[in-house]
Structure formats: structure tokens, C-alpha cells
């Protein structure tokens, strides 16, 4: 096994085996669930073992997807994620305008800023 998780509280969603203490993983696939002793018997010299200290885990569905049109539109905007001030916001706009040869008077949109993270607690004015 590549990885063994022990001392956990696993909900398996399997009616015949609803809970387990440990999980064995090989090539990123769960290969076995059971008690700590049962699963530790599957370890090899290269197995990484992680003690979950009683933490609970449940199966999850990860829906990773993309709204292509929205993403494409954002690519044409100034990326303002992580700005910490109006000054930094202005600097990003100036840099974007220079790098993209934006014509004077053209409307330039920005996306991603959050004034709640601004160090000076000021809100940009239009």
C-alpha cells in the first residue's frame, strides 16, 4: 500500500460495513477498509502511515467544473484578486493598460477584489 490512514472514524456508506477505523490506499484508490490492525497488516516498507487522531471522514463528491464563457470574459479583465488597497488596485490597472496597449478612453473592467481585505478599510469610488 502507498498510504494507510489509521485511528480514524470513517463512514463508508456501505450498508454491510458502515464504519471503519482505517483505510488502505494504493495508486490513489481505496483498496481496503477495516480495523487498524487489519489495515496495518497490509503495509509494506514504503507505506506512509497517517494517524488521524480520531477525526471523522466521509465520502465526498468533488464537482470541479468551469463556466467557460465567464472564464473567457474574466481573462479580458484586470485580475484584482488579493489586492490590499485602492493604491494596489490602481497599480494593477495601470500595469494592465500598459501591457495590453489599451486605447485612451476605453473601458477597462476588473474582477476579484474584496474591499473587506483592504488594509485601509476604504471602498473604491467610481
Image (spheres, rainbow, N blue to C red):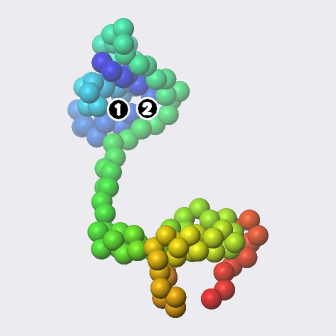
The answer to whether any part of residue 1 appears in the image is yes
Q: Is residue 90 left or right of residue 99?
A: right
Q: Which residue is drawn at 45% across and 28% down?
A: 8
CB-based contact (under 8 Å), mark 1 and mark 2: yes
Q: Mark 1 points at which residue?
A: 19
Point out the image quarter for the N terminus.
top left
Q: Which residue is drawn at 33% across and 21% down?
A: 2
**Nearest the camera: 57 or 88?**
88
Residue at screen point 34% across, 26% down: 23
Given the current orientation, which residue lies at the most extreme right position?
120
Q: Distance between the residues labelled 1 and 2?
A: 7 Å
Q: Nearer the viewer, residue 17 or 115?
A: 115
**Which residue position is annotated with label 2?**
9
Q: Is residue 111 visible?
A: no
Quarter of the rendering containing residue 26: top left
Q: In this view, does 15 lie above or below 108?
A: above
Q: Which residue is drawn at 24% across and 37% down?
A: 15
Image vertical order of residue 32 relative to residue 110, above or below: above
Q: Where is residue 22 in the image (x, y as percent from the top left)?
A: 38, 24
Residue 25 occupies quadrant: top left
Query: Quick one: 28 or 101, which is closer to the camera?
Result: 101
Is 54 on the left or on the right of 31, as rendered? right
User: Dot 2 surroundings within 10 Å: few (below 14), some, or many (20 or more)?
Assistant: some
Outermost residue on the bottom side: it is 105
Task: Give the x, y percent position of residue 5.
Answer: 41, 25
Residue 30 rendering spot, x and y as whole percentages: 27, 30
Residue 27 is left or right of residue 36, and the answer is left
Does label 1 or label 2 sit earlier along the sequence? 2
Looking at the rendered structure, the secondary structure element under dot 2 is strand
Q: Is mark 1 on a helix, strand or loop?
A: strand
Amino acid at each position: 500500500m502507498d498510504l494507510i490512514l489509521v485511528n480514524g472514524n470513517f463512514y463508508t456508506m456501505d450498508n454491510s460495513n458502515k464504519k471503519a477505523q482505517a483505510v488502505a490506499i494504493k495508486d490513489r484508490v481505496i483498496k481496503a477498509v477495516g480495523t487498524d490492525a487489519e489495515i496495518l497488516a497490509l503495509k509494506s516498507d514504503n507505506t506512509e502511515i497517517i494517524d488521524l487522531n480520531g477525526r471523522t471522514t466521509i465520502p465526498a463528491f468533488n464537482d470541479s467544473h468551469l463556466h467557460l464563457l465567464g472564464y473567457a470574459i474574466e481573462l479580458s479583465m484586470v485580475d484584482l484578486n488579493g489586492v490590499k488597497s485602492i493604491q494596489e488596485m490602481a497599480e494593477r490597472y495601470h500595469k494592465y493598460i500598459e501591457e495590453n496597449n489599451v486605447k485612451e478612453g476605453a473601458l477597462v473592467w476588473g474582477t476579484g477584489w474584496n474591499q473587506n481585505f483592504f488594509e485601509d478599510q476604504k471602498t473604491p469610488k467610481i
